[in-house]
Amino acid sequence: MDLCRDKTFLLSELPIRSRTHFLAADLEIPPVSEEERIALFCEYLKDGRLENGLTAEELASKFRFSPGQIRLACEQALGLAQLDGETVISSRRMHECCYRQAVHKLENLAVQVRPAFSWDDVVMPEEQKKLLRHACSHIKYRYQVYYGWGFDKKIAYGRGLSVLFAGAPGTGKTMCAQVMANELNMEMYKINISQIVSKYIGETEKNLQAVFAEARHANCILFFDECDALFGKRGEVKDSNDRSANVEVAYLLQQIEEYDGVCVLATNLIGNIDDAFMRRITYVVHFPFPDAAMRAEIYRRTIPAAAPLAGDIDWKFLAEKFQLSGGHIKNIVLSAAFLAAQEGVPIGMSQLLRAAVGELKKNEIVVVREELREFADLLND
């Protein structure tokens, strides 16, 4: 049997005796192996140089492309770099060119999230931050560990990355999912749980199968927010509804275990997560409620460098007085910015205090003026 020397050949270019003849059987082309994808990336990028830290192994691990997709992605990256007079292909550009080749329909099942945060925005204990970086390394060095060091022969399935974020609302779970996407230069899709879960037997499994099938083509991060509705504990079977719910959880566990990509799941109630699911999670990152020092830092980091600031802001007082999560602090800072813009002044203590009081009122919490001490009169501004 003759071997095709060019792996990017098209079936339409093969000679046929007559265009009136039809194939008598389906021709199944096996997927390209990871080693073959690495060789193809190296071949098509031989006239260029990747940014330090980015390797053909990492690209091949992330993008399960056909030879044609790899060729087009590399040609685009090389061409754009040459147009800009660059001798090195940046990681971001290479990933963007790869994602242009990804063909999928995941946007019909999920919402794409454009990552807006980086490590500089993360305010959390160093232990949790190290765990996040370790999770990112799982993707960067997957080829080296599984194929270079032979772990592929010991671990037949479950080679994907699953990360569970557990913490109260507003503690930074969604933000850190975006940080991971930014760090890995991967697209992220947020799964709409309400569109997945169905009251009709069998429909939830069908929806989940569609999500994971498209995710394999999208080569992206799947983000399940408030995943308790999908990953709840399996209970005693008393009727057909209980049996159906248990089947859904079991099916989802199977899908995650078979998925070679990245799944990030967020929950406010980790105690409600099924034990079998917890055993299949690669990393669990706990998001603690921020203490006063962390809250003060969140205030500072939430305000952009271009925003004008008054000199009367007491970050320590704001952090100690208002015991709020990072999500609430973000709302306060943004509200204060609009107050300052409306009043034509820099963002100051008056705007931040009024915004904080307003944020607490939304949660039916009343602030006593006397508790604001020397800042009480600023509420009258």
Image (spheres, helix red, strand yellow):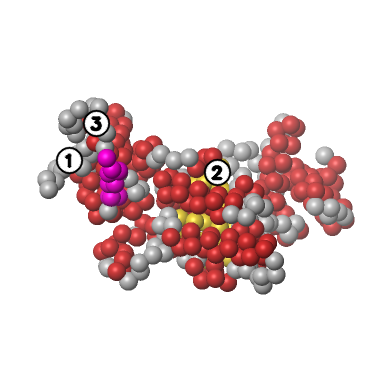
Quarter of the view holding residue 86: top left
At label 3, the amino acid type is His
Would residue 52 be found to the left or right of residue 330 on screen? left
Label 3, label 1: how far apart the Cα atoms are: 26 Å
Image coordinates of residue 91 in percent, x first then y, are: 35, 44
| Cβ atoms at labels 3 and 2 below 8 Å apart | no
Q: What residue is rendered at 72% in x and 41% in y?
A: 335
Label 2, label 1: how far apart the Cα atoms are: 36 Å
Label 2, residues with CA under 10 Å away: few <14, some 14-19, many ≥20: some
Label 1, residues with CA under 10 Å away: few <14, some 14-19, many ≥20: few
| Cβ atoms at labels 2 and 1 below 8 Å apart | no
Q: Which residue is mark 3?
A: 21
Quarter of the view holding residue 122: bottom right
Label 3, label 2: how far apart the Cα atoms are: 39 Å
Q: Identify the mark at residue 109; answer none if there is no mark.
A: 2
Mark toward the viewer: 3 or 2: 3
Kind of element beneath mark 2 = loop
Going from N to C along the chain, the mark reached first, 3 or 1, is 1
Going from N to C along the chain, the mark reached first, 3 or 2, is 3
Mark toward the viewer: 3 or 1: 3
Label 3, residues with CA under 10 Å away: few <14, some 14-19, many ≥20: few
Image coordinates of residue 242 in percent, x first then y, are: 67, 65
Q: What residue is rendered at 36% in x and 38% in y?
A: 101
Assign the magenta stretch its main secondary structure: loop
Q: Identify the mark at residue 6; answer none if there is no mark.
A: 1
Report the magenta residues as a range.
24-32
Image coordinates of residue 196 in percent, x first then y, are: 60, 50
At label 1, the amino acid type is Asp
Kind of element beneath mark 3 = loop
Image coordinates of residue 295 in percent, x first then y, are: 65, 57
Q: What residue is rendered at 50% in x and 43% in y?
A: 106
